[in-house]
């Protein structure tokens, strides 16, 4: 690319300088084709300048992996004009508007596909920015991606159900109410109230709680049992002592290649991660507290109580047993949480995974009478999270084709179909589902069904499978919510 570019510059230079007398020869020399060594040196100098910019401004280094960064570099390298970057005011005004217009234009095919095939899901979540303004984000999602719509500053507003419903209604009217299948928010009481208002206004609309948020709350509730809560608190104390002091931190690192992780303040899931890492480092932690270096540090008056407490905790077998039980109990819940918190299709997996979690809870070895209490807590969270769409997604997922369906699943998927489809479409959908369950026609063709296998080289997502081989109306029921 660079050689061709310099060749074109040489040709243009010769044309422009022909007949210009003594000045032509020096100019041609300056534009001579660079050697390979010169090009390598030139690239290295450019790399140094980019690195210097990133280091000096504190920009995260992973920005170089962004496709936008690569496109920018390629565009600059193709330019024939000296380039010193955009003006500050232009970035704040005209360029911002132009890029926004380009992004909107690029989103048009995505929006058209969603309107014709899958429909949209409207997602809303509240947060507080760096200026402590309470904001509500609104995003549209479909199987092909997400689009940020806007953030509403709710300063001075009463964020009750009516207010939130009004904001969501305005968004839906802007997008087109008939193209929105569902609204997803967390399970706060004001959001539940808003959901009721929305379903009255838009009878076809489904309102769902955020699955990841609900599962995190379930983990937090389970971790709130005194048996787990006390031992998790002990684990946090051990982690603090071994990470907050320079000496103990350095001493621990001599025994372990792994670092201890501190739990965060927002998601309880982070406590699970911290406890799991602590379990992995059990031997190293115990070796640390029985070392002579630890004993010398513990003899100092200001550390004596902390050291004594930590030693007593980590040398107690019941402490590690409790942490292991906690991890085993939460493992399938966390696995599902990770799945729904990713960009992978997951709605069809929620129903069967939650059924497996309930079975798992009954088989976990816990102190007397805890199993039923734990099961009741998870069942209560599942009842709040559950939607007929979960049953319909489970039914239409090729991975579970032919699975035996309980009465609850059958009732739920029919309820979902009736809400989404006209009576004629509903009849067609039931007929199609029967063929699918019985593996009739294309649904019994192993070559076609293998396309839905995630490991197949020509894998197609489930919504696309239904759009191509089944009733088009069904594909909007299956993609990940």
Image: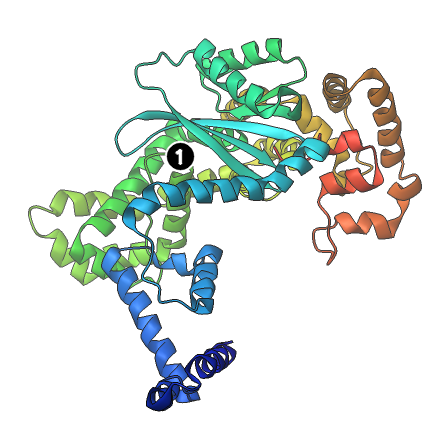
The C terminus, quarter of image? top right
> Does residue 70 appear to the left or right of 286 in the view shown?
right
Say what secondary structure mark 1 lies in. loop
Mark 1 closeness class: few <14, some 14–19, many ≥20 residues within 10 Å: some
Relative to 90, say whether 69 is above or below: below
Closest to the observer, 245 or 409: 409
* Image point (39%, 14%), residue name: 159
Coloring scheme used? rainbow
Asked where in the image residue 457 lies, by quadrant, the reply is bottom right
Relative to 7, say whether 48 is above or below: above
Asked where in the image residue 197 lies, by quadrant, the reply is top right
Q: Indicate the position of residue 186 as horizontal and vertical percent values.
A: 48, 24
Closest to the observer, 369 or 139: 139
In the rendered image, the residue lying farthest to the right is: 441
Q: Indicate the position of residue 385 as horizontal and vertical percent values.
A: 57, 23
Q: Indicate the position of residue 264 as horizontal and vertical percent values.
A: 33, 39
* Image point (21%, 60%), residue name: 250
């Amino acid at each position: 690319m660079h050689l061709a570019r310099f060749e074109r510059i040489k040709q243009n230079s010769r044309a422009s300088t022909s007949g210009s007398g003594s000045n032509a020869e020096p100019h041609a020399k300056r534009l001579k084709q660079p050697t390979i060594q010169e090009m390598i040196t030139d690239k290295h100098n450019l790399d140094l300048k980019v690195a210097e910019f990133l280091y000096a401004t504190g920009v995260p280094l992973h920005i170089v992996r962004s496709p936008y960064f690569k496109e920018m570099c390629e565009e600059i390298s193709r330019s024939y004009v000296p380039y010193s970057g955009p003006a500050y005011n232009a970035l704040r005004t005209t360029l911002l508007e132009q890029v926004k217009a380009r992004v909107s234009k690029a989103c048009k095919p995505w929006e058209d596909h969603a309107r014709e095939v899958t429909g949209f899901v409207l997602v809303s979540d509240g947060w507080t920015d760096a200026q402590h303004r309470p904001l509500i984000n609104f995003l549209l999602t479909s199987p092909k991606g997400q689009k940020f719509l806007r953030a509403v500053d709710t300063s001075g507003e009463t964020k009750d159900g009516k207010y939130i419903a009004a904001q969501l209604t305005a968004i839906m009217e802007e997008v087109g109410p008939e193209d929105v299948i569902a609204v997803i928010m967390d399970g706060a009481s004001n959001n539940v109230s808003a959901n009721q208002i929305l379903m009255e206004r838009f009878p076809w609309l489904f309102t769902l709680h955020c699955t990841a948020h609900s599962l995190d709350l379930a983990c937090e509730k389970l971790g709130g049992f005194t048996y787990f809560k006390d031992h998790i608190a002990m684990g946090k104390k051990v982690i603090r002592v071994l990470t907050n002091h320079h000496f103990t931190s350095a001493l621990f690192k001599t025994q372990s290649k792994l670092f201890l992780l501190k739990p965060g303040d927002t998601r309880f899931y982070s406590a699970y991660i911290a406890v799991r890492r602590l379990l992995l480092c059990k031997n190293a932690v115990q070796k640390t507290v029985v070392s002579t270096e630890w004993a010398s540090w513990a003899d100092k008056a200001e550390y004596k109580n902390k050291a004594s407490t930590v030693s007593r905790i980590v040398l107690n077998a019941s402490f590690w047993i409790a942490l292991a039980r906690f991890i085993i109990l939460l493992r399938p819940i966390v696995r599902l949480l990770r799945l729904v918190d990713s960009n992978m299709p997951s709605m069809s997996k929620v129903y069967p995974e939650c059924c497996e979690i309930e079975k798992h809870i009954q088989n976990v070895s816990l102190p007397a009478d805890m199993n039923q209490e734990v099961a009741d807590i998870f069942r209560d969270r599942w009842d709040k999270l559950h939607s007929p769409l979960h049953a319909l997604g489970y039914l239409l997922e090729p991975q579970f084709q032919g699975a035996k369906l309980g009465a609850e699943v059958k009732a739920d998927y029919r309820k979902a179909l009736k809400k989404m489809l006209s009576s004629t479409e509903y009849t067609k959908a039931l007929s199609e589902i029967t063929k699918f369950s019985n593996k009739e026609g294309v649904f019994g063709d192993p070559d076609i069904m293998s396309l839905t296998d995630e490991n197949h080289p020509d894998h197609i997502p489930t919504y696309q499978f239904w759009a191509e081989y089944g009733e088009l109306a069904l594909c909007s029921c299956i993609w990940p919510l």
